[in-house]
């Protein structure tokens, strides 16, 4: 099986899922990578806060935009996880962002 066939199979598999599950899956993946970039990797490796900032902002936009379609039942745990990663970013950052200026905060509001 070629790489192309594998990718096509993955796309077909994902396309069979409800949109809520696809959005949730990718939001969790983005949050997981952002957490690692904030220095929360289990293996203790250093992260890259510039990369974390980009990922957090992207997932904040995704969650905020999708929330009305996700409903509170699905959006709430994603918002909670996002907030935890935003707080981890603040803690890891040497230069502190002003309230409302941290990653994703233009979508979520200030995180303290």
Image: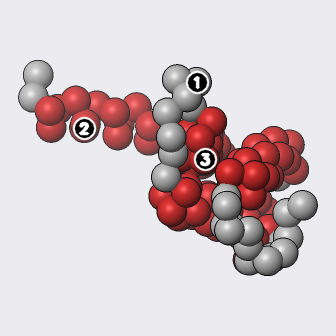
- The residue to which callout 1 is attached is 42
Residue under the image location 48 percent in, 58 percent down: 51
To which quarter of the image does residue 7 belong?
top left
Q: Which mark is residue 31?
A: none
Residue under the image location 85 percent in, 63 percent down: 111
Q: What element carries label 3?
A: helix
Vertical position of residue 92 compared to residue 57: above or below: above
Q: Label 3 to label 2, Cα distance in Å?
A: 32 Å
Residue 54: image x %, image y %?
53, 64
Q: Do the numbered discs 2 and 1 sit on residues whose CB atoms are within 8 Å? A: no
Q: Of callouts 2 and 1, which one flags the residue occurring earlier in the amino acid sequence? A: 2
**Closer to the camera: disc 3 or disc 2?**
3
Residue under the image location 15 percent in, 37 percent down: 4
Q: In this view, does 3 lie to the left or right of 28?
A: left
- The residue to which callout 2 is attached is 8
Q: Of callouts 3 and 2, which one flags the residue occurring earlier in the amino acid sequence? A: 2
Q: Label 1 to label 3, Cα distance in Å?
A: 12 Å
To which quarter of the image does residue 90 belong?
bottom right
Q: In which quarter of the image is the C terminus?
A: bottom right
Q: In this view, does 5 lie to the left or right of 79?
A: left
Residue 108: image x %, image y %?
79, 68
Residue 35: image x %, image y %?
61, 42
Q: Foreground: 40 or 11? A: 40
Q: Do the numbered discs 3 and 2 sit on residues whose CB atoms are within 8 Å? A: no
Q: In this view, does 8 lie to the left or right of 28?
A: left
């Amino acid at each position: 099986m070629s790489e192309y066939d594998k990718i096509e199979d993955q796309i077909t598999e994902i396309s069979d899922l409800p949109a809520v599950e696809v959005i949730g899956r990718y939001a969790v993946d983005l949050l997981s990578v952002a957490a690692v970039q904030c220095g929360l990797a289990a293996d203790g490796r250093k992260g890259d806060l510039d990369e974390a900032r980009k990922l957090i902002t992207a997932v904040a936009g995704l969650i905020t935009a999708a929330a009305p379609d996700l409903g509170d039942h699905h959006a709430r745990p994603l918002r909670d996880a996002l907030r935890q990663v935003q707080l981890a970013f603040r803690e890891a950052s040497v230069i502190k962002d002003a309230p409302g200026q941290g990653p994703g905060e233009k979508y979520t509001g200030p995180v303290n």
